């Protein structure tokens, strides 16, 4: 990998070298390196689609999988499908993410569309971390469209941490989940847009099993002339608990839309939504500025804490 790709790996996956455990590193549309372990097997898809299948044996504990994608070739556009088969009673961490470096000039678009499908076995636990980042000369466009589909078996748990750092001109982020009895699904999304960037986020969660629980939390900052749209749909089809929250800071000439939707099809479905959009409070700026910070420095500290 060249130095640009190595730098992207640090930004999206905190990788300063070869990771421990199982991994598949994709660069400019091809697999750069791969490693399987005794409990985690990574294989190239055989159904004609570009991507990989990851098989995690039942009972696997305290192991990790890294599957970052980096693009440094200007104008490269790809669609990748990755499927995860996570065995019962396992407990693993999966680190993904995509970084794009585009210096192709005006009208050059680099794009990565990734669809990740998770089949999480009975009583298994998964932590999934995904970061998106773009950079370049400011003329070309960086586009990322992540789709995540989650199937949670009885008692299965999945926690998602998704972050869009900066530099992504357009993104459509779709997450769909269905849950059986006792399953738990938690999403923590952090999103920052600026300039003319556009970000669409769409969550659809079907709570089909008794005593399942879903928590969707989105925190975002929209600056410049950027546009954000947040839509979440929770369907309570059994005795369950669902909570969705969208909290956004709007700045400059940005636009933010939040549209939470709750649908209950069972008398014991408890569903809650919260949505708040507003600017940085003046008293917060004043308080920090009395400590010696400039207005810009105070603003940066508030945003950093908000997205932490």
Image: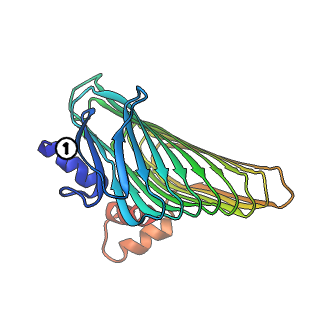
Instruction: Give the structural element (helix, strand or loop) at label 1.
Output: helix
- Estimate the x, y position of residue 293 in percent, counting from the top left: 31, 70
Residue that protrudes farthest toward the top in the picture: 107
Tell me what residue is drawn at x 48 percent, y 49 percent: 85
Residue that protrudes farthest toward the bottom in the picture: 291
The answer to whether residue 115 is above or below residue 177 is: above
- Estimate the x, y position of residue 77 in percent, counting from the top left: 33, 27
Disc 1: CA contacts within 10 A as few (<14), some (14-19) or many (>=20): many
Tell me what residue is drawn at x 26 percent, y 24 percent: 106
Numbered marks: total:
1
Tell me what residue is drawn at x 15 percent, y 42 percent: 1
Q: Residue 170 lies in what quarter of the image? A: top left
- Estimate the x, y position of residue 29 in percent, counting from the top left: 27, 32
How is the structure coloured here?
rainbow
Would residue 97 be visible to someone looking at this image? Answer: no
Q: In which quadrant is the C terminus drawn?
A: bottom left
The answer to whether residue 158 is above or below residue 263 is: below
- Estimate the x, y position of residue 30 in percent, counting from the top left: 25, 34
Q: Residue 13 lies in what quarter of the image? A: bottom left
Would residue 191 be visible to someone looking at this image? Answer: yes
Which one is nearer the viewer's eye here, 110 or 137?
110
Tell me what residue is drawn at x 78 percent, y 51 percent: 237
Residue 5 appears left or right of 256: left
Can you identify the residue that label 1 sits on? 5
Which one is nearer the viewer's eye here, 262 or 238?
238
Residue that protrudes farthest toward the left in the picture: 3
Which one is nearer the viewer's eye here, 232 or 183?
183
């Amino acid at each position: 990998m060249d130095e640009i790709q190595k730098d992207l790996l640090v930004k999206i996956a905190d990788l300063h070298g070869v990771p421990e455990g199982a991994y598949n590193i994709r660069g400019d549309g091809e697999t750069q390196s791969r490693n399987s372990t005794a409990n985690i097997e990574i294989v190239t898809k055989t159904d004609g689609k570009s991507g990989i299948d990851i098989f995690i044996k039942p009972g696997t504990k305290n192991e990790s999988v890294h599957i970052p994608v980096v693009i440094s070739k200007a104008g490269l556009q790809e669609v990748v499908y990755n499927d995860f088969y996570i065995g019962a009673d396992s407990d693993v961490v999966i680190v993904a993410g995509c970084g794009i470096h585009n210096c192709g000039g005006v009208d050059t678009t680099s794009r990565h569309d990734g669809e990740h499908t998770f089949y999480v076995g009975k009583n298994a636990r998964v932590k999934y971390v995904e970061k998106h980042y773009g950079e370049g000369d400011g003329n070309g466009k960086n586009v990322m469209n992540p789709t995540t589909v989650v199937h949670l078996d009885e008692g299965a748990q999945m926690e998602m941490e998704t972050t869009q750092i900066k530099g992504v001109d357009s993104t459509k982020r779709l997450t769909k989940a269905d849950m059986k009895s006792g399953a738990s699904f938690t999403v923590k999304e952090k999103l920052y847009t600026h300039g003319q960037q556009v970000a669409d986020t769409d969550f659809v969660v079907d709570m089909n099993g008794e005593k399942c629980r879903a928590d969707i939390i989105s925190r975002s900052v929209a600056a410049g002339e950027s546009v954000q749209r947040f839509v979440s749909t929770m369907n309570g089809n059994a005795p369950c608990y669902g909570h969705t929250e969208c909290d956004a800071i709007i700045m400059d000439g940005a636009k933010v839309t939040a549209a939470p939707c709750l649908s209950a099809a069972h008398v014991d479905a408890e569903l809650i939504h919260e949505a708040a959009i507003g600017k940085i409070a003046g008293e917060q700026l004043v308080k920090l500025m009395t400590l010696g910070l400039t207005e810009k420095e105070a603003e940066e500290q508030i945003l950093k804490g908000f997205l932490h």
